[in-house]
Image (tube, grey):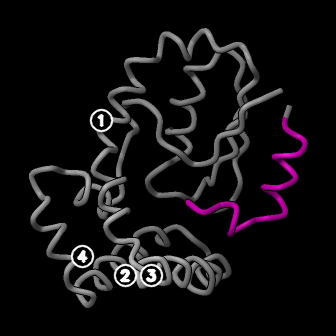
Amino acid sequence: ARLCLLNCYYAESPTWRLPEIIELFGDPNLKELAQAFLASPDKMDWLITFQDNHFQIKLPPNLKDRFVGIVRPIVDGNFAAGAGPAFAQMTAQVRDSVAYNTSRLPDVRRFTTKVNLIWGALDPYLTPATAAAIAANYPHSETRLVEAGHWLMIDKPTEVAQLLLTSG
């Protein structure tokens, strides 16, 4: 009946900004540097902490606590379990994926199903302007901002669940 999007990338736009860790792993010219981070758990931990601090820049204290208590343990657990190579492979494809999606914008503009963007307004990378740029491509879209960061479903699970259930 509808498509719901939560803090995601789609096509090229003036608002498109990648987190630094994805810039590093997504740039083919920096592949050796990215692999050096993956090969050193201490250096990778430093990089993840650097990125964490940037994701939290706009968060109020209660959401910073959720980030540190929920998101970071998930990230740490994934990397400790060997997710580094999969992360590197996924992020290496980000530019190609966005370029492909950009080429498909004429199809997106013919998409007649209702599209709801449920968006963390405090995400420093995928900003409300990014949501507006994505929404502008769909003929029937609505954006709902949540006072949350990038992981809005962790920051505000009840509010996001309610919006998922009632959007339409």
Secondary structure category for the residue under label 4:
helix
Q: Which residue is mark 1?
A: 96
Specify which label sits upstream in the sequence, 2 or 1: 2
Specify which label sits upstream in the sequence, 3 or 4: 4
Relative to residue 122, is residue 147 drawn left or right?
Answer: right
The structure residue drawn at horizontal position 43% and vertical position 75%, both measured from the top left corner, is: 52
- Local crowd size for mark 4, using a 10 Å CA cut-off: few (<14), some (14–19), many (≥20): many
- Image quarter of residue 15: top left
Q: Could you give the CA–CA distance between mark 2 and mark 1, rounded to whole angstroms?
A: 27 Å
Q: Is residue 160 magenta?
A: yes
Secondary structure category for the residue under label 1:
helix
Q: Which amino acid, mark 3?
A: Ala
Start-end of magenta stretch: 149-167
Q: Nearer the viewer, mark 3 or mark 4?
A: 3
Q: Which amino acid, mark 2?
A: Thr
Residue 12, position in %: x, y? 37, 30
Q: Which residue is mark 2?
A: 49
Residue 83, position in %: x, y? 40, 71
Residue 124, position in %: x, y? 46, 57
Q: Which amino acid, mark 4?
A: Leu
Relative to residue 75, is residue 22 drawn left or right?
Answer: left
- Image quarter of residue 150: bottom right
Q: Which residue is mark 4?
A: 38
Q: Residue furthest bottom?
A: 42
